[in-house]
Image (cartoon, grey):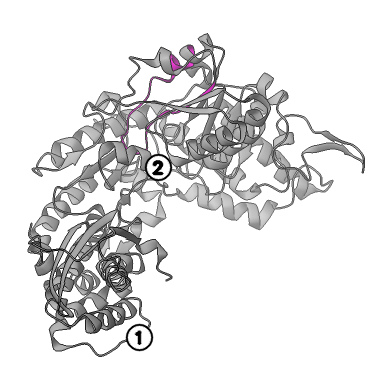
Amino acid sequence: MQPDTGKSHATVTGTLTGLDVAAIKEDFPILNETVHGHRLVYLDNAASSQKPREVIDALLDHYRHNHANIHRGLHTLADRSTQLYERTRRHVAQFIGGVKPEEIIFTSGTTESINLVAYTWGEANIREGDEIVITEMEHHANLVPWYQLARRKNAVLKQIPITVCGHLDLSNVDKIVTPRTRLVAVCHMSNVLGTVNPVRQLADIARKVGARILVDGAQSAPHMPVDVTELGADFFVFSSHKMLGPTGVGVLYGRYDLLENMPPFHTGGEMIREVRFDKVTWNDVPHRFEAGTPNIAGVIAFDAALTYLERIGMANVHHYESELTRYAFERLAELPGLEIQGPQVVEQRGGAISFTDPDIHPHDISTFLDSRGIAIRAGHHCAQPLMRILGKVATARASHYIYNDRNDIDALVDALKEMRKYFGV
Amino acid sequence: MSSSLDEMYREVILDHFRSPRGRKPLAKVDITTDGINPSCGDELALHAQVEDGILKDVHVDCKGCAISVASGSMLAAAVKGRPFAEVLRLAEAVRKMLKGEEDAALPEEFEDVEALKGVRQFPVRVKCALLAWVTLIEGLKNYQSGHGTDKARVSTEDEKS
């Protein structure tokens, strides 16, 4: 953990909530925006989070003082940029449970991280008739790359079903994960249902049949402590932009022995050791997987996001968000007929709350809330197969983060009540 | 009250949304077409009865957002009882109006339909307003070629915007 620079308000206090949210709000300049004459109530964090001043400053500082290309230059700025870039790699390694920095690969986001595994490990290890197991609650990012891989290889794509309560149904899991299974790919936390999946249990099931497990942590890494070794993950992927960091930065954690034996993904500069016209040799892990000039400024500023979260403490983040979810459930119950998807028990879920109104379409809900300054997401949330199973064409989704408080939930519920009057249904 | 919100959800639109017209199933069906708007998930079933070159009655069943439901309801009220060829011409005119291509003069009875123009400020919602009209156009054209009851399916995704 980095020492407190004194620039930030984010500290753990002795209050009931555990976080001094009023002070945290002040660290996020965008929260001073007004939308249609109302203060911004930002509840679309499962899609992307806002950025604290320290992250914005880190981006600007980089371009103002330090920018050069990394790893190859012999001048001062090149060295500075390289040092800062590699510092973030070490920081990420520490953030997800203290793995080797070489096990951290920077990508453009969770989607690219998963595609990287599909096109490298997948190409090398999946054969005709092999099975790839996903779940019914996967985001398209953890579905379509495996669908495509299965098609390329004539492999079989299988799904672990969900129960009516929005949990994984593991009652027949031994018929789904079999000795033919090479990979299990599962989200740690569902972006629609909020469900937190039993990843350790699935990792043990996968290991028993000799399969690898990839964990999509896009929704979990921003909101709870993650220790990839404890989880038993062979691959763990997530995005900077959902956890206070810049867009265009993603992480792929892979066990070193797996990465070492994987062919490259993109080819070009940086990922090579030696190039001749008739022979090319690959660079070491992780550089083998980082062809070309990466998002240098974004990676460097991501360090500030991790520092910010660590200063609060991920356990405190998780605890605070659970309390806010509990409060949101209480208040949303004031709206008769409003249907909340996923686990109704706060301990079994995160803070992404998908809901539907019996009479008003999610897009109308979102448009109305926007007119009151409230940002939520409406649609299929890039999980069309799951929506089909839920029997919904779309849902509205409110998702909170460390800078949201009870006032924001109150604003949401009050606006939903007003909306019902407005539409007169 | 937000002015842009009221610009989209005009009172006449909310009125059609609350109590949609044309919900009564038809005794005789000469045209049947389904429309979908994949971006919102709106689904619409359109049935029509044609007699002596007149669109005698229209039944619209729309499950979707306020805009798509209201648009379907307005369609049912506006085209009922009009000559087939005129309906096809007017439906094309409404389609062009909603897409902002051309503001053709519409009959007085299309006053409600004109209120849908407000969606043009909300590009992502234009397809919601279009759904009923492109479904009708598809049904009319299929009827002309003798395939009115083939249960054709049309998607707003095929609309170039």
| Mark 2 Cα-neighbour bin, 10 Å: few <14, some 14–19, many ≥20 | some
Q: In this rendering, is residue B160 above or below A362?
A: below
Q: Amino acid at mark 2?
A: His
On the picture, is A227 further left or further right than B63? right
Subunit ID for the residue under disc 2: A
Asked whether A49 or A141 is in front, the reply is: A141
Quarter-of-image position of residue B104: bottom left
Which numbered circle lies on residue B102?
1
Callouts 1 and 2 close, C-beta under 8 Å = no
The quarter of the rendered structure image containing the C terminus of chain B is bottom left
Name which residue lies at 54% across and 32% down: A2
Q: Residue at x 29, y 72 (%)?
A: B137
Which x, y percent locates residue B128? 28, 64
- Between A70 and A332, the one nearer to me in the picture: A332
**Is B115 rendered above or below residue A141?**
below
In the rendered image of this protein, does residue B84 appear above or below residue A346?
below
Q: Is residue A259 visible?
A: yes
Q: Amino acid at mark 1?
A: Glu
In the rendering, at what x and y percent does residue B4 appear? 25, 72
Could you tell me residue B8's position as x and y percent?
Answer: 23, 71
Q: Quadrant of residue B68?
A: bottom left
Quarter of the image for residue B131 reads bottom left
In magenta, the rendered stretch is A182-204
Q: Which residue is mark 2?
A: A9
The x and y percentages for residue B89 are 28, 83
Which is nearer the eye, A13 or A210? Answer: A210
Tell me if residue B54 is in the magenta stretch.
no
Question: How many residues crowd around disc 1 within 10 Å: few (fewer than 14), some, or many (20 or more)?
Answer: few
Residue A189 located within the stretch drawn in magenta: yes
- Please name which of the two marks, 1 or 2, marks the residue nearer to the observer: 1
Which of B106 and A107 lies nearest the eye of the viewer? B106
Q: Chain letter of disc 1?
A: B
